[in-house]
Image: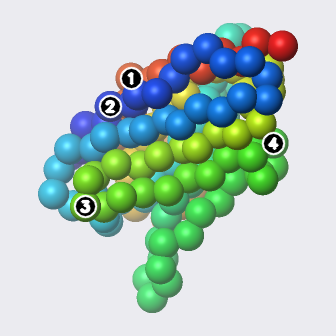
């Protein structure tokens, strides 16, 4: 089992940047498929980015089309942390950002496949 704690949210003007972090407990962090999701008021939780792996393949990242080229996900297995660097932020990026982890999701973009979730961190982008 793993516990996730997000940090780094806040209020930023459009065009600005934020870096979110997600600290994970446990000794097998390197085996987890990690992802970020977000949820805006009145909307469903949506996939943002993933940092995952497949047998015989190194870690690789994937992004929602809406954030591709602006957001970067990375991980530090030595520190048990996954990051989300968010640049060129837009008002539509506003929402609660959640870190998610799973051992078997194999990099799924569906929130239903992730077993472990953080409490979320609020990101607000003003226009």
Q: Sequence-wise, which precedes: disc 4 or disc 1?
A: 4
Crowding near pointer 4: few (<14 within 10 Å), some, many (20+)? few
- Residue 94 is left or right of residue 50, and the answer is right
CA distance separating discs 2 and 4: 25 Å
Q: Sequence-wise, which precedes: disc 2 or disc 3?
A: 2
Secondary structure, mark 3, is: loop
State which quadrant residue 92 falls in: top right
- Residue 66, numbered label: 4
CA distance separating discs 4 and 1: 23 Å
State which quadrant residue 87 falls in: top right
In this rendered view, identify the residue nearer to me: 102 or 80: 80
- Residue 4, numbered label: none
Q: Sequence-wise, which precedes: disc 3 or disc 1?
A: 3
- What residue is shown with label 3? 78
Q: Mark 2 and 1 residues: CB-CB less than 8 Å, in contact?
A: yes
Instruction: Name which residue lies at 59% across and 32% down.
Output: 18
Secondary structure, mark 1, is: loop
- Residue 118 is left or right of residue 50, and the answer is left
Secondary structure, mark 4, is: loop
From the viewer's perspective, is residue 55 above or below residue 26?
below
- Residue 119, numbered label: 1
In this rendered view, identify the residue nearer to me: 50 or 115: 50
> Is label 3 or label 4 in front?
3
CA distance separating discs 2 and 1: 7 Å
Instruction: Name which residue lies at 25% across and 37% down.
Output: 3
Crowding near pointer 1: few (<14 within 10 Å), some, many (20+)? some
Instruction: Name which residue lies at 28% across and 44% down.
Output: 24
Q: Sequence-wise, which precedes: disc 3 or disc 4?
A: 4
- Residue 82 is left or right of residue 5, and the answer is right
Secondary structure, mark 2, is: strand
Q: Sequence-wise, which precedes: disc 2 or disc 1?
A: 2
- What residue is shown with label 2? 5
């Amino acid at each position: 089992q793993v516990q996730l704690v997000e940090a780094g949210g806040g209020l930023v003007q459009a065009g600005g940047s934020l870096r979110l972090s997600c600290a994970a407990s446990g000794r097998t962090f390197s085996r987890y498929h990690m992802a970020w999701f977000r949820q805006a008021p009145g909307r469903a939780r949506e996939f943002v980015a993933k940092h995952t792996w497949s047998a015989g393949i190194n870690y690789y990242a994937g992004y929602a089309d809406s954030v591709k080229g602006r957001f970067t996900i990375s991980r530090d297995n030595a520190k048990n942390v996954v990051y989300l660097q968010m640049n060129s932020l837009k008002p539509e990026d506003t929402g609660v950002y959640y870190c998610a982890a799973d051992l078997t999701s194999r990099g799924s973009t569906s929130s239903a496949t992730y077993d472990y979730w953080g409490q979320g961190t609020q990101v607000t982008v003003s226009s």
